[in-house]
Amino acid sequence: MRSLPALMPLLLVAAAPPPAFSPERVSADVKTLSSDAFEGRGPATPGEEKAITYIAAQMRAAGLQPGGPPINGKRGWFQEVPLLRSTIVGTPDVTVGGTKLTQAQEIAIRAPLNGARQVDIKDAPLVFVGYGVRAPERHWDDYKGVDLHGKVAVVLINDPDFETAPGDFGGKAMTYYGRWTYKYEELARQGAAGVLIVHEFAPASYGWPTVASSNTNPQFDIVRADPAAAHTAMEAWITRDEAVSLFQQSGLDFDAEKRRAQARDFRPMPLKPRLSAHYAADAGVIRSHNVLGRLPGAARPDETVIYSAHWDHLGVGKPDAKGDTIYNGALDNASGTAALLEMGRAYAHAPRTARSVLFLAVTAEEKGLLGSEYYAQNPVYPLATTVGVLNMDGPFGSGAAHDFTISGSAKLGLLDRLQAEAAKQGRHYTPDPHPEAGSFYRSDHFSFAKQGVPAVSYDQGQDLLNGGEARGQALYQAYVKDRYHQPADEWSPTWDLSAVPQVMGLLYATGRDLADGTDWPNWSTDSEFRAARDKTAAARR
């Protein structure tokens, strides 16, 4: 039997009270970060310098240690993130089957991200590759026997079973194979000269105006050692009407061929029209920064739990109806950054965890999850021994709620843990009501998921303590309509931050359990991310 003195330290640790999370501190951080002085926190702008300096100062004041990559043997607060910025110069000259296509009307061409400053494609054959999926764990391959070098692929958006009963890909709930980013990546791996994604409203979950505006602006990517391995020379969308015409010129019915592509035995097929494309690009490198604060683990410092949030927003842009040009990004995502700082304070004033905890504020989420993508490609701490990622993007919603959710749908142990901790608060999990939108792939946790690291992005539920689901949905819709990615996303002293203790308590308890534990959460066996995680299993034994 242990003596009383030997037991006392253990009793003191076990009795440590849970941290107190302050809505007032969170509100103050949001107010500062989203003020006009920070100019919308655009990457590589004066607003970035103010934002990252403020975040690092708050991390230091909280008691965190610098967690960035060592420079001359000493860690700092920042990880430099070089970003490629590419813009099409002038008007692209594109013809298909002898018909000229107009940028933003029949076609939406992205500026090249493969490192090219000039795209010249002449009379390239078109090949229909169905949904463009290669998924060994689902025994699915849309590239049977095809050589795409020198050819342009025509590919459908979303998964093969989106329009049919749930099948190999889960029906309406989009997998990564359905996401447009996957289509581009896979066709680069296949060696295609270019990609034409066929736009349809329902499977894309947004209209053609969104496609046209998003793809004809300057494009960004991380600076890659081999950019051509991730991007074809030409990446573009075409309208459904244009796709129908391509198939008609080949003596084919578009809808019939789409149905054929929804079966496992689909094989790629050539189309008769040929494509020519000529346009120049102005490309250069800008430099932004991730901010990293860390608390080394007391027992297993090489094992890491990550809390993350993106600090950036849209910067200065077109004026709204009131003439306001600063896109302040208060909810998106000064609130998540404030949550990250408050979480750092809680851990810094609590007993040290067994594993290390990293507080990661990433850049360029609004440019395509690029800060988190850069970290995942260039991890400061090994991903094989990264236990999991809890991402916070607008985490407080419209107030305290009976429920919570996560961005998109995913099957992994982290969600099980969140549900268990939420139950202790008398709360429950509500699945994403629109899984077809692919929300899982639109926040920073996804950059880690692609590398196999278990990761979720927390979302507050809409079943509010004050007003229930009806009020929660009404407030959410009003935000999307009137403030999302608009200058009106501003701090207000009337914000309902009653969710702060609830949300922070849940995320703290979940992360604390991971940081003090020895087990390793994983993805479900049928997840598209399980294979990448399993490849590094030896590092966790």
Image (cartoon, helix red, strand yellow):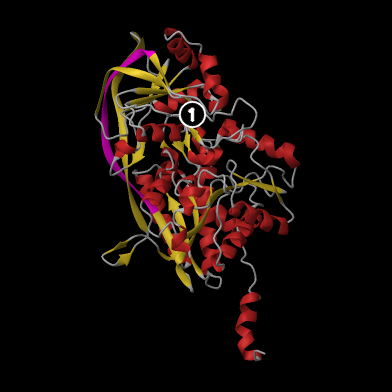
**Helix, strand or loop under label 1:** loop
Instruction: Return the residue at label 1.
Output: 320
In the rendered image, residue 12, in percent from the top left (x then y), is placed at 63, 80
Above or below residue 207? Residue 246 is: above
User: Residue 77 appears at what percent x and percent y?
Assistant: 37, 60
Q: Give, as a single range, the part of the protein colored magenta.
A: 272-290
Category of crowding for the residue at label 1, using alpha-carbon neighbours closer than 10 angstroms: few (below 14), some (14–19), many (at least 20): few
Residue 115 occupies which quadrant of the picture?
top left
Quadrant position of residue 383:
bottom left
Residue drawn 40% across and 60% down? 381
Amino acid at dot 1: Asp
Whole-percent x, y for residue 385 in the image: 45, 61
Q: Nearer the viewer, residue 206 or 316?
A: 206
Q: Is residue 202 left or right of residue 304?
A: right
Q: How many marks?
A: 1
Asked whether 287 falls inside the magenta stretch, the response is: yes
| Residue at x-position 59% and y-position 64% | 513
The rendered magenta stretch, by its main secondary structure, is classed as: strand
Q: Nearer the viewer, residue 400 or 158?
A: 158
Regarding residue 325, the answer to whether it shows in the image is no
Residue nearest the observer in this picture, 29 or 355: 355
Which residue does the image show at 59% across and 50% down from the upper left? Answer: 412
Asked if 242 appears above or below 65 in the picture, the reply is: above
